[in-house]
Amino acid sequence: MRGSDSRSRRPGIITGLVVFAIAVGLYLISLHNYLLFHSLAELFSILVAGSVFILAHASQRLHRDSFVLFIGTALAACGFIDLLHTLAYAGMGVFPDAGPNLPTQLWVAARYLQAASLLAIPWVIQREPRPRLIYLSYAIAGFSLLAAIFGGFFPVSYLEGSGLTPFKKISEYVISTSFIASAWLLNHWKRRLDEEVVRWLTIAALVSVGSELAFTLYLNVYGLANAVGHLLKIAAFYAIYRAVVLVGVSRPHDLLFRRLRESEESFESIVQQSEEGIMVIDEAGKLRFANPTLQRWGGETLLPDRHTLKTLADSRAPIDVPLSTPAEAQGIGELVVARTLWQGEPAYLVTVRDMTARRRAEEALREREQQLLQAQRLEMVGRLAGGVAHNFNNLLTAISGLTQLAMEDIGPDSGTYKYLQETLGASRRAAALTRQLLAFSRRQLLNPQVINLNELIHNLTGLLSRLVAENIKWEQRLAPDLGAVKVDPGQIEQVLINLVMNARDAMPEGGTLTIETQRLTLDEKEADKHPGIPHGEYALLSVKDTGTGMSEEVKAHLFEPFFTTKGRDQGTGLGLASVHGIVEQHKGHIRVYSQLGRGTTFQIYLPCIAQPAQTATSKERPLLPCGTETVLIVEDEHNVRESVAAMLRNLGYTVLEAADGAAAIELCQTHDRELDLLLTDVVLPSLSGAQVAERLRLLCPTLPVLYMSAYPLDAFVRHGVLDKDIELLEKPFSVDILAQRVRAILDQSKASYVDGHASKS
């Protein structure tokens, strides 16, 4: 700081020495030629005043107050009057008729104006600059003084033969007092100004006092007092000049360049620490600047060629570029080119932004959108599947029922019996297909039981082993401590069968098929190994094969309905879709791990429950129950109604048939015997099955009802059949199931009737 202060003071010292040399020269001139001395002295003062005004006017926008412009305008006004004072001397020939009184009056007027201006400085400090007002004020003041002088209103200041008038002498003392007062005021309000400025203005005021007192000793033009007065006036003007230069030029210059330097340093710091890569390339394609971020990402390796630079600069379109980052092998950056100047020459400004995280987020969003679209497609196909399953089940009910009746009529010795067996088998396979459709749509009616998966696998081993070829090695690894799960055993069996068949088809040349169970506790430590699975206890069922494996593209479509990699007529594309639907319907999770040539593993997570598993007990098939009661069948499908009626009549029951609810009510009202059972479809053309049952119970209050339906689960919600105690017969059904369910409901109804009468008696 001391070095910089000394450097800043050096020009001021030199200027001071120059002024001192000029003053000495003027004094020497005054000893021989007063007119020349006076003219040079006044001219120097006028030049100083003009310089101060020019500086003040040019730098007014750099200041927040009126000080510089005010003092500059004041000196300019004084300098103008001093110019007239110089020209008024007899030897100048400008005012030939004027005596010595005119230049003396002009001198006094200029000094009054100078003193008043110094007195007013404290009142203009820190006030908002108003140039027009300042210029107008001094124009009026100067014009008024000149008008008074040239109009004869200004007091006489010099008399021929007598010298200076009392007014002139008194004015010198008044002006001196004003200068002293201004010095005191400046020091009193020095907090509002720079200390050095106050010091120079104080020097100017005190030196002006000396100048005025010297003129009070004026005897003749060649006297020492006259020369000293003019030289002190020059010194006072120089002091004011120094004050204005400090505030108007030096300090703003230093402040401007200091702020510029600070701005450059801040800008450089921002560029160097920016998280964006920044580089400048000249038109020759040479790298001129690159910040650390861009150098860390690859530096010149990111540099486009000259043609690409020009194209990108014209279009301002961003392009993606590879980034080398410490944390990752490869990142993605967005590069933008703009035209700029570098050291005055045209260049290209290239900015690179790391877009790796954003691109990944966008990719994740696209994946989520695809998953949402996939879910919506699955939902639409699921609804379609539910409707198709309904129609199939109605048809299969008629086909299987009539086929069974035909087989009973002709007996096993008939030549057509085996064809009927094949027909019945085909209908059962078709029924399995509809179950897959319902499982896929997640609308299959579940019959959940608490079981142990190991026991289910043991019971299914015989069937599963017959599904695989002899060149496939069969392995089971069942955990002994596997927890119990609450599932529909038939649905989980279907899952296992589908997965085993899928594994078999993936190993046409043979291999190893492994079924494995494991008890799994997912906590915070284990969650990372099983992403997407909530914490908890799970029974993990795995089906592994050493087959051909799957590509990522195949895995992306694995659970889509009707998607298959098998040849024509070798798969329906519903196997894995139904597996996915069954697992989700059981609130489970499924994961697939596969690589081409290294096999596939399906993992199914089923939540465990804290209940003991039910032990399977062997049940002998009961004899086909019969009866003689009256049963009313309400079914709008003619084939289904005919086949069910035929099966019941074959069992000994009296059967009444109705195609809709209105016909059923009319038949009940006209029939002479009381009905024993209502067997009705859930969905009917006019009245629903539940509404038909409600109307008929007005006529027969104790009438038992057995519902049958080929619709999926949500049909019950839409048609108001929500009572958990209802009896429902799922289509398609066999004669055995129909006989057992009808007989059970009739027996239960009779038992309830007997118990009711016994309690009344």
Image (cartoon, grey):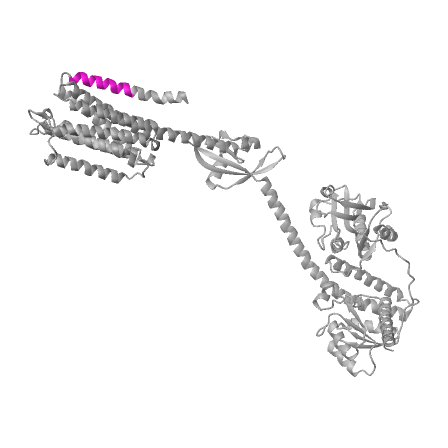
Q: Along the horizontal axis of the image, is 418 left or right of 240?
A: right
Q: Quadrant of residue 712?
A: bottom right
Quarter where residue 1 is shown: top left
Query: Is residue 694 highlighted in magenta?
Result: no
Q: Is residue 318 visible?
A: yes
Front one among 83 and 170: 170
In percent of width and height, residue 237 lies at 24, 26
Main SS of the magenta segment?
helix
Read off the magenta span: 15-30
Give the total number of marks visible in the rendering.
0
> Image quadrant for the C terminus?
bottom right
Residue 402 drawn above or below residue 186: below
- Is residue 19 within the magenta segment? yes
Q: Is residue 72 left or right of residue 354?
A: left
Does 594 appear above or below 82? below
The answer to whether 202 is drawn above or below residue 514 in the figure is above
Residue 107, visible in the rendered structure: no
Q: Nearer the viewer, residue 310 or 172?
A: 172
In the rendered image, residue 43, in percent from the top left (x then y), is placed at 19, 25
| Residue 354 in picture, x, y percent from top left | 56, 38
